[in-house]
Amino acid sequence: MSNLTSDEILSVNNDSSQKVSGSISQHIDACDYSSVNHSIDAQNHAYSDMPGYLMENCELCPRKCGVNRTQGKKGVCGVSSDMYVARAALHFWEEPCISGTEGSGAVFFSGCTLKCVFCQNYELSHGEYGKVVSVERLAEIFLELEEKGANNINLVTPDHYIPKIQKAMIAAREQGLKIPYVINCSGYETRELIHMLDGLADIYLDDFKYMDGEKAAKYSGAPDYPERAMESLEEMVRQCPEPEFSENGIMKKGVIVRHLLMPGMVKNAKQVVDYVYDTYGDQVYLSLMHQFTPLEKLEKYPEINRRVTHREYERLLQYAMEKGVTNAFIQDGSVAKESFIPDWNGEGV
Ligand code: SF4
């Protein structure tokens, strides 16, 4: 096989995007949410008391801390049941089929169930940052983002607030929200948590950081990450089994698995590609990223205290291409810099 370049993977993406053309407003009008609304009715009934009960003895995520977040206690995620949002604005740096030219309506939540030593959003993930918002206000925020032209509502690290977010998702749909919901999550979820989003989530933008449990333990304090990531992905694909796009290439439904290549970890990255592609083939889009930026002091982890080299990234791309991966997104060389990270200035909250 001849050497395959990054451009060739990009051209694969472009080809798939070129299958469709038209305006986003057409896409929005064309979306059929009748089946979604049916599920929403069922979920409204099933989860009518949701904001309280799952946070009183919180086992929402694989950490299963068992703390009463409704009384201000905090587990590993670092947040009580108060829902903190740091920013809600149009975001242009997701995959092309998510951001498009109009932007993705990204809502960034505080706290995180993972504690990655290399976290790219440290302020946000390590505690209560931003403003507390109610379920009602969150639904309003979704509608405001749609009004601003967002292609979708992109819920960034929502896991630990899902019972409340679920309510807001339902409320906004009932008030006429038409654009898809994107669940932008870490991969470290229980199957049950993802199941709670059945009928609500349109797109999963799912991290898959590790197939190597030792690395997951060392860098994210989650030795069971690979198992949880495999389980949650299975449920995501069950809900969204086939990718669907609007006429102009904006995703309407589907699963995108992101893998952030870490320094010296090409083998782990290949294992992720192997698992995802061998299990799901073209059902799932792969997004292979090299924007790892050693923002925090990583003296204790000198082996990852650098950027990913061009050679490492090319090795991963080459591997994916040789496996036959065609549904993939890749990054060019200009993204690994701090300016890529948004300001957490409370915009839109
Ligand atoms: S959501 Fe937070 S408090 Fe609940 S189990 Fe997970 S880390 Fe613990």
Image (cartoon, rainbow, N blue to C red):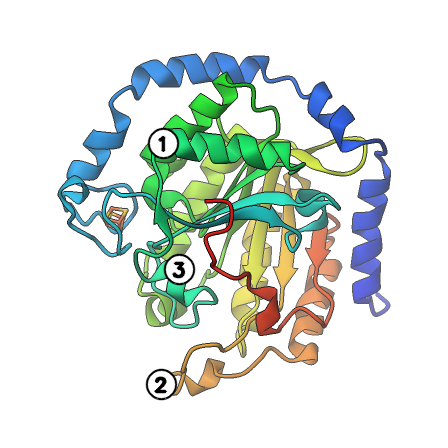
Residue 63 image offset from top left, x and y in percent: 25, 51
Quadrant for the C terminus, please.
Answer: top left
To which residue does mark 1 refer?
135
User: Residue 60's quadrant in the figure?
Assistant: top left
Q: Is mark 2 within 8 Å of ligand 1?
A: no
Residue at coordinates 27% horizontally, 43% vertically from top-left? 82
Q: Is residue 334 above or below residue 305?
A: above
Label 2 or label 1, whichever comes before in sequence order = 1
User: In this orientation, does residue 190 appear?
Assistant: no
Q: Which residue is mark 2?
A: 300
Going from N to C along the chain, the mark reached first, 3 or 2, is 3
| Nearer-the-camera pick, 67 or 153 | 153
Question: Which secondary structure, mark 3?
Answer: helix
Q: Position of residue 267 (x, y in %)?
A: 55, 70
- Does 124 sit left or right of 53 as displayed? right
Q: Residues within 10 Å of mark 3 (few under 14, many from 20)?
A: many
Residue 124: mark in rendering: 3
Q: Does 136 appear above or below 307?
A: above
Determine if residue 89 is in view: yes
Quadrant location of residue 35?
top right
* C-alpha separation, residue under disc 3 versus residue under disc 1: 20 Å
The amino acid sitting under disc 2 is: Lys
Image location (x, y in percent) of residue 186: 44, 52
Q: Is residue 18 left or right of residue 29?
A: right
